[in-house]
Amino acid sequence: MNIIPCGKNEALKVKVDSFAEALRVEAHRLGTHGMDER
């Protein structure tokens, strides 16, 4: 079984969750990948 660093470090988990949410919200604006807001 692999250890997931975020599972052991709550502060890191919060940062990763925050970044993931920001990326999800702004992804449609990044580059010319053809994705829309959905």
Image (cartoon, grey):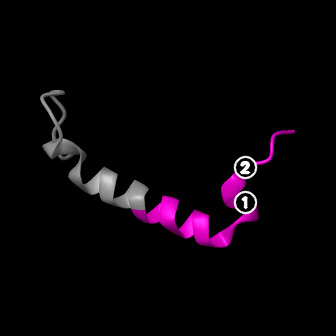
Provide the residue designation for mark 2: 4
Which picture quadrant has residue 2? top right
Give the structural element (helix, strand or loop) at label 1. Answer: helix
Residue at 42 percent of width and 55 percent of height: 20
Please identify the quadrant where the C terminus is shown.
top left
Magenta-span inclusion, residue 29: no
Residue in the picture at 70% in, 66% down: 9
| Secondary structure character of the magenta stretch overall | helix
Q: Secondary structure at mark 2?
A: loop
- Residue 38 in the figure: left or right of residue 6: left
Tell me: residue 28, above or below residue 7: above
Total marks placed:
2
Q: Which percent across, then down, holds residue 34?
A: 15, 27
Marks 2,1: beta carbons within 8 A = yes
| Part of the protein shown in magenta | 1-18
Which residue is denoted by mark 1 in the rendering? Answer: 7
Q: Is residue 28 above or below residue 23?
A: above
